[in-house]
Amino acid sequence: MPLDRLVLILVIVIAAGGATLWLGAVIASAFAWPGGWLLAIPAALVAYIAVRIVGDRLGNAEDDHYDRME
């Protein structure tokens, strides 16, 4: 495995871990006070949009120009 790919995987894993901790803190704080749902709902909407974008990028064969590179 090339070094640049390994570093990229490590950066992605660390970023995903940080995002998970941040989202967990936002959700935990949402239940600490009554108006916390106002923070949980936008966080859920952002997560939904992110999942849709990633799904569209992975499923779109027309946009995947790296498959044709050699």
Image (cartoon, rainbow, N blue to C red):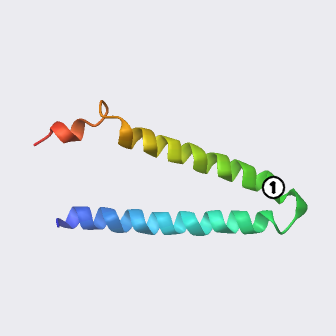
Judge from the rendering whether residue 6 lies leftward or rightward of residue 35; answer left or right: left
Pointer 1 local density, CA inside 10 Å: few below 14, some 14–19, many at least 20: some
Q: Position of residue 1 (x, y in %)?
A: 17, 67
Q: Position of residue 67 (x, y in %)?
A: 20, 41
Q: Position of residue 21 (x, y in %)?
A: 59, 69
Q: How many marks?
A: 1
Q: Residue at x 35, y 35 (%)?
A: 60
Instruction: Describe the element under mark 1 as helix, strand or loop.
Output: helix
Q: Position of residue 15 (x, y in %)?
A: 46, 64
Q: Residue at x 44, y 43 (%)?
A: 55
What residue would you read off at disc 1?
37
Q: Residue furthest top?
A: 62
Image quarter in which the C terminus is found:
top left
Q: Residue furthest right?
A: 34
Q: Quadrant of residue 68?
A: top left
Judge from the rendering whether residue 39 lies leftward or rightward of residue 56; answer left or right: right
Q: Nearer the viewer, residue 59 or 12?
A: 59
Q: Nearer the viewer, residue 59 or 17?
A: 59
Instruction: Look at the picture and state if 1 lies above or below 48.
Output: below
Q: Residue at x 24, y 62 (%)?
A: 5
Judge from the rendering whether residue 49 lies leftward or rightward of residue 35; answer left or right: left
Q: Nearer the viewer, residue 70 or 55?
A: 55
**Amino acid, disc 1:** Trp
Q: Quadrant of residue 27?
A: bottom right
Q: Residue at x 76, y 54 (%)?
A: 39
Judge from the rendering whether residue 20 lies leftward or rightward of residue 16; answer left or right: right
Q: Residue furthest left?
A: 70
Instruction: Look at the picture and state if 47 lies above or below 19.
Output: above
